[in-house]
Image (spheres, grey):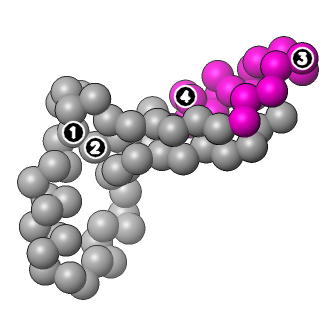
Amino acid sequence: MIGAIEPGMTASELHGHVTDQGVREWTAGIKDIMLESEDIAETIAFTVSLPPRVNLQQGTIMPTGQPA
């Protein structure tokens, strides 16, 4: 059973919909260290592969600050 998976800053098309110029500049400056959608998918795959006796309540996925 999974309670919640909470990804940190993830590169996605949603950033193209941000209208605040300050936020757009900030996210453009950290784009190379953001999580990729594949990072989230791999984490979900790992989580659902756990045996039924394991209950993962919450997972917070954060970038390490290392470029991909």
Circle nearer the viewer, 3 or 4 = 3
Give the residue at mark 3.
53
Residue appearing at x 40%, y 47% in the figure:
8
Q: Is 29 on the left or on the right of 33, as rendered?
A: left
Few, some or many residues within 10 Å of mark 1 (<14, 14–19, 20+): some
Give the residue type at disc 2.
Met
In x, y percent, where is residue 13? Answer: 36, 63
Give the residue at mark 1.
33
Where is residue 47, by image quadrant? top right
Give the residue at mark 2.
34
Give the residue at mark 4.
42
Choose the circle earlier in sequence order: 1 or 4.
Answer: 1
Circle nearer the viewer, 1 or 3 = 3
The reply to whether callout 1 and callout 2 are in contact (CB within 8 Å) is yes
Circle nearer the viewer, 2 or 4 = 2
Choose the circle earlier in sequence order: 2 or 4.
Answer: 2
Gap between marks 2 and 4, in whole Å?
15 Å
